[in-house]
Image: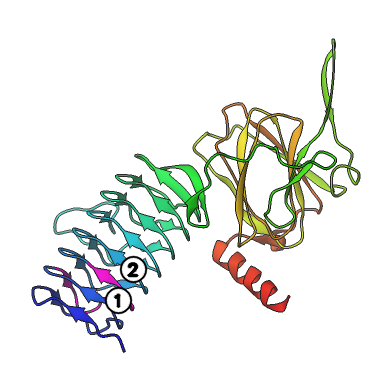
Amino acid sequence: MKQTFVHPQALCESTDIGAGTRVWAFAHVLPGARIGADCNICDGVFVENDVVLGDRVTVKCGVQIWDGITIEDDVFIGPNATFTNDAFPRSKVYPEKPTRTLVRSGVSIGANSTILPGVEIGTGAMVGAAAVVTRSVPPNAIVVGNPARIKGYVAGGEHLGTPFAGGGTRQTGKVGLGVGAASLHELHVTKDLRGELSVGEFERELPFVPKRYFLVFNVPSMEVRGEHAHRSCEQFLICVRGSCGVLLDDGHNRREVTLDRPSRGVYMPAMIWGTQYRYSPDALLLVFASDYYDPDDYIRSYEEFQRIVSRQAARA
């Protein structure tokens, strides 16, 4: 069985340390901290009492993890990253309880970044070096800057890179995206001296007859919308003016597409986690939905979405 290692020059007062964890020189772990298995706590790290670290967490040199912070499994924290737990600190004035911060599994936090109190960093997200995280980060998002803004998303541990904008083998104007049954559609365009017209026929070119539509507009460019899945509702998205990025995630694969003209749409079937971001200032997003609005049809937690996908895969 793996043994816990504590360097002779470390001060580890906690007895709740998992097998295989290493605590290196000049680190200080207070008695109430709970640290999982196979963690690596590097030189000069401070861990306060009301702290939970999951398994296989790497904490590089010069990091302080204060009361109220929970870090799940497989998280990487770069050198000198700074956590906070009091939004209004004053000398000798202490909050009744620390503000809670949650870092979900698989997150990477870059060197010298600052995490403000009360945020949740979603599963698989990446925080760039020196970023200042002032609000919660969606799952799998890449955030950079001060304040941190979404730059892109990751897929399978790698950056998604250039958003998908068509190409590939087309059948009746449709391209599969490799994310469940989601697909990108190029709709028919007619041009003459009077202008241009784009048209799509439901149940012929588009996959369902809608019962509802909604429009999204006047979205500040840094804002993110969506961030949910539907249990049964299907959607078809067209950016009729301007442009926006659409991220699709089936729990196993992710793909980003750019909607930048009214003749391009994306089909998002049920049980696809959808996120829309990178709105241009003039963006107008039209969404057709297969069902009437039902709040119970929404899955708003990515962790719950993953659990449902796993259960469905186990039954298949």
Furthest residue toward bottom: 1
Residue at image mark 2: 57
Horizontal placement of 226 versus 41: left or right?
right
Q: Is residue 39 magenta?
A: yes
Query: What's the magenta region?
Result: 27-41
Classed neighbour count for the residue bearing mark 2: other residues with Cα under 10 Å, few (<14), some (14–19), many (≥20) = many
Horizontal placement of 301 versus 285: left or right?
left
Q: Is residue 207 magenta?
A: no
Q: Position of residue 223 (x, y in %)?
A: 52, 40
Contact (Cβ within 8 Å) of mark 2 with mark 1: yes
Magenta span: predominant SS is loop
Furthest residue toward front: 169
Asked if residue 22 shows in the view, the reply is yes
Q: Position of residue 266 (x, y in %)?
A: 72, 43
Classed neighbour count for the residue bearing mark 1: other residues with Cα under 10 Å, few (<14), some (14–19), many (≥20) = many
Closest to the observer, 142 or 290: 142
Nearer the N terminus, badge 2 or badge 1? Answer: 1
| Residue shown at 76% from the left, 61% from the top | 232
